[in-house]
Image (cartoon, helix red, strand yellow):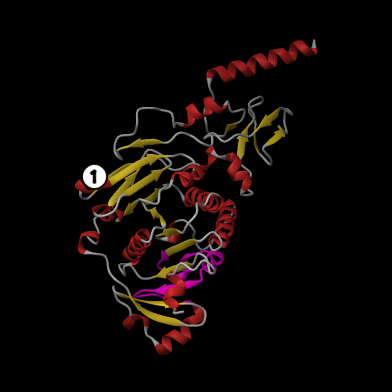
Amino acid sequence: MSLVKQAFGDDPIQGGTSIITFGSFGSGKSKLLQSWAIRDFEKGHLVILRSKDVDTWQDLSERYPIHVYTPDCYHFTFDDPSQNKNIKYTIIRRPDDIVQNLKRDEINIISALGSEFETGFFWSWFSKSLTHHHSKGWTTLLFDELRDVYQSHPSGDSFKVYESFVSALTSFRKKRIHFRASTHTFHDVYYEILYKFQYTVYLKGSILLPKKRTALETRTPIQEACNRETFILDNISEFETVHHSTLPPELATSQTVAIDGPDFSSSLFPLELLSMGIRPLVKCPECERSFHAISPRQSCPICKEEISLTDKIAKGTPKKDYDGENPPEDTLLSPLSIEEKTRMQVSVVGEGGEEREKERRKEKKQNKRRTKW
């Protein structure tokens, strides 16, 4: 079997494959991932494409149905507004709920904005859910600019988020999930993630991985062998120069879509933070002191009040469709309304309490005093 068939084929024995693409600015990494997305979509794969805050996936809407899933109300601005006609938008607040709503007859775009920690938390949770709730058939997850989310030197709680993503990557092969990612150089990515990839693609201007630098430099100069229609496919023991088909002109205009909106907040999901080994900072509803939770149910270390930790966004939250510009008027998906529905007993630090919650605390204190007397 050729190296190309091994890397891009759907072999049930081999399972899902993982490929990372290296290339300099403007070498065609994003368009190469989009061409892989189109090829796998036409093969019947469940195709998932990560969206950046400024991206070019709107080109694909000229020919293919696009469905954008977001955890918040975002505003999408297109270079060409007419290309918005073949795109659907859905707000789903929990990554595991997004996984269960993905469709094979559409190219699924996932948008989540925020800091490196917040987006890393989102995609680690999403990847774990993808392996747990994976449907039958093949899946392709395409992750452009991996460095934006998983950088080379994590610290603190980010390290635990990265380790959760590494754990999900090890399950992709068994679940028949193809993972395709891109970045500028191997220096950008956390080393445990980097060495989980089975294959490497070098585009023009790439810096070779240390293990293959001598062999490839003596046989095939990267700067001369690669262009927009050619890349070098490499694994541990061999490499091959591959000529790939480029995107048709109507899908390669590089017109952009810009995304604006609120950042994804991991503080709304303390239970999921605990599952990654992160101790969320919470506030006791009785004494209003803050502390780091270590389990879903525990006593406040100050007043010994028995409390339960609950995600503010309940699982199975109804999804909301909108036009990508005007957020839906219904506040069903707002954190406050979900908090009221789930009757939270713990408030995450930074979130304001309700007046009736204060009255409940006051009444509870009075009852305690009466009991003492």
Q: Quadrant location of residue 32?
A: bottom left
Horizontal placement of 80 versus 180: left or right? left
Name the foreground residue: 62 vs 43: 43
Name the foreground residue: 131 vs 279: 131
Q: Quadrant location of residue 252?
A: bottom left
Percent of width and height locating residue 128: 55, 52
- For label 1, the crowd category at 10 Å Cα-Cα, with few meaning under 14, some 14 to 19 and many 20 or more, is few
Residue 192 painted magenta = yes
Amino acid marked by disc 1: Lys
Would you place residue 220 above or below residue 121 in this image? below
Residue bearing mark 1: 85
Horizontal placement of 12 versus 81: left or right? right
Residue 311 painted magenta = no
Percent of width and height locating residue 359: 59, 15
Give the residue at the far right of this rendering.
373
Q: Quadrant location of residue 372?
A: top right
Residue drawn where x is 41% and y is 65% of the image: 183
Horizontal placement of 360 versus 42: left or right? right
Which contiguous range is marked in magenta?
Answer: 182-209
Position of the C terminus by quadrant = top right
Residue drawn where x is 42% and y is 86% of the image: 217
Give the residue at the far bottom of this rendering.
218
Would you place residue 330 above or below residue 95 in this image? above
Name the foreground residue: 15 vs 262: 15
Percent of width and height locating residue 93: 46, 39
- Mark 1 lies on a secondary structure that is helix
Percent of width and height locating residue 338: 50, 29
The total of numbered circles placed on residues is: 1
Name the foreground residue: 241 vs 338: 241
